[in-house]
Image: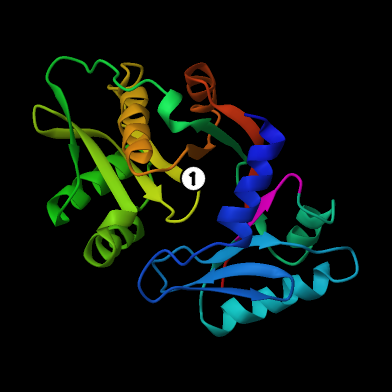
Amino acid sequence: MEPQHLRDLHDLQLRREARSDGPGCRVEHVDGVVRHTGPAHAWNGVLWSGLDARDADRAIAAQIEHYRAAGLSFEWKLYAHDTPADLGDRLRAAGFTAEEPETLMAAEAAALPREVPLPEGVELREVTDEAGVRQVVEVHERAFGTDSSDLGRRLLDRLATDPDAVTAVVALAAGEPVSAARLELYPGTDFAGLWGGGTVEGWRGRGLYRALVAHRARVAAARGHRYVQVDAADTSRPILHRLGFLTLTTTTPYVYEV
């Protein structure tokens, strides 16, 4: 695997040729960008842009107008290799707020560890119903300290309308949810996405994150996806690197609140 090849493939399949990811959502190619629009609890934002210094400000203004008209806050997902080089500065000048950058990483799903030993008394369980979704939301809120109700609604939407497109997994310790993550499957592409891996305090450093990566990679490979990709936080990047993930680029969420 060459990082440049994987980055270009990711740009093509998951950004330029992006598909909608839930009921009521749509993907549009307008003004030199690819954007995703859906209900307020969905992910709304710009996935890809092919802009230059002459048209960037106009395109930024057009996206603000589009999402404002819908009453939606949104994210411009900016990658380090996107153009023009000062696009981040232009977004900030237009009223966006930059969040913490993440590292885009990828690995061959079949090459990753297939099993990671779990602590005694811990089991992994795939989420298939509302009760399982509540456990995922509970873990995320405890692990990250944020309101994860929108995540819960998105998961319920996908399980109800397209259950083959998502696999959520929760780790239970004596019945208590202590870690959770999900796998987004992108039909017709080489990729599946690892999202939302979180472990509550007191259970970190005991292999649960690695176990969830292994479980999801095994599912991705069985479903015909060659690669798994992840937008890694600083806390996850060293673990993923040791597992064999390659660094492709960095990505920074720029958020516009309406």
Residue at horizontal 37 percent and vertical 20 percent from the top? 113
Residue at horizontal 76 percent and vertical 54 percent from the top? 88
Residue 190 visible somewhere in the drawing: yes
Q: Quadrant of residue 205?
A: top left
Residue at horizontal 42 percent and vertical 23 percent from the top? 112
Q: Is residue 170 left or right of residue 226?
A: left
Can you say which quadrant of the picture contains the N terminus? top right
Q: Which residues are magenta?
A: 76-81
Q: Nearer the viewer, residue 197 or 73?
A: 197
| Disc 1 crowd, CA 10 A, few/some/many (<14, 14-19, 20+) | many
Task: Look at label 1 and name its amino acid.
Answer: Phe
Residue 79 within the magenta-colored segment of the rendering: yes
Q: Residue 52 location in percent, x, y? A: 86, 63
Can you say which quadrant of the picture contains the C terminus? bottom right
Q: How many marks?
A: 1
Q: Nearer the viewer, residue 8 or 76?
A: 8
Q: Residue 18 location in percent, x, y? A: 55, 62
Most distant residue in the right direction: 54
**Where is mark 1, residue-wise?**
191
